[in-house]
Amino acid sequence: MTVDTAASGKIFQIWQKLQEVPFGNWLFTRAVCFKAPYFRTVHPLIHELRPGLCRVSAPNRRGVHNHLGTYHAIASCNMAEIAGGMMTEATVPSTHRWIPVGMTVEYRAKATTGVTSIARLDTIPEFGGEPIELIVPVDVLDADGNVFVSAEITMKVSEKQTR
């Protein structure tokens, strides 16, 4: 997979710069949560970000439990969305914009541990003049590496309007 990282958006460039400083991942994640406050509800930490891949973890804590004491389904969706959104941001060139327009989720099991969400594209499409729907697969894993939630997020990607 060959990607021109120089063409990626400003957010990815900020990620790259913060990798050079102590606690860079933490600082970057806090900035993401400031911009999109709902993500704070799961206490995420972005560990890895590059075109075609994002890996995010979150602790197991009472605030994300359902009535059964397991990781809540919607908290799992939140983890899928942060990984999918950040991976898309790192992948889509700076000449384009994206927005999630749908998500399909499969709940496979219960989780009682901290979780990790991984968004991965095996093939990065060409982003041209025509809008496309990019399907972003995301797995949410428990601490043992078992996928307990899988999601597909549909991202509409189009060229930015020039003024």
Image: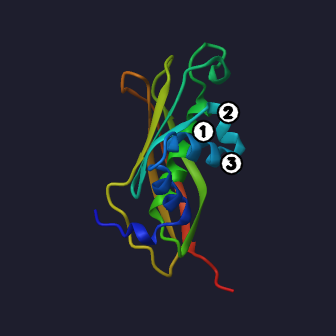
To which quarter of the image does residue 60 belong? Answer: top right
Type of the residue with mark 3: Ala
Above or below 161: residue 19: above
Type of the residue with mark 2: Thr
> In front: 105, or 158?
158
Which mark lies nearer to you, 2 or 1? 2
Counting residues from the N terminus, which is met first, the one under dot 2 or under dot 3? 3
Q: Which residue is mark 1?
A: 78
Residue ID at (55%, 59%):
11
Q: Position of residue 58 (x, y in %)?
A: 53, 30
Residue ID at (63%, 24%):
64
Q: Are marks 2 and 3 in contact (CB under 8 Å)?
A: no
Q: Residues within 10 Å of mark 3 (few under 14, many from 20)?
A: few
Counting residues from the N terminus, which is met first, the one under dot 3 or under dot 1? 3
The residue at the far left in this view is: 1
The residue at the far front in this view is: 21
Callout 1: SS: helix
Q: Residue 41, which numbered label?
A: 2
The residue at the far bottom in this view is: 163
Q: CA distance from mark 2 to mark 3?
A: 11 Å
Q: CA distance from mark 2 to mark 1?
A: 9 Å
Q: Residues within 10 Å of mark 1 (few under 14, many from 20)?
A: some
Q: Residue 135, which numbered label?
A: none
Q: Position of residue 103 (x, y in %)?
A: 56, 48
Q: Residues within 10 Å of mark 2 (few under 14, many from 20)?
A: some
Q: Which residue is mark 3?
A: 36
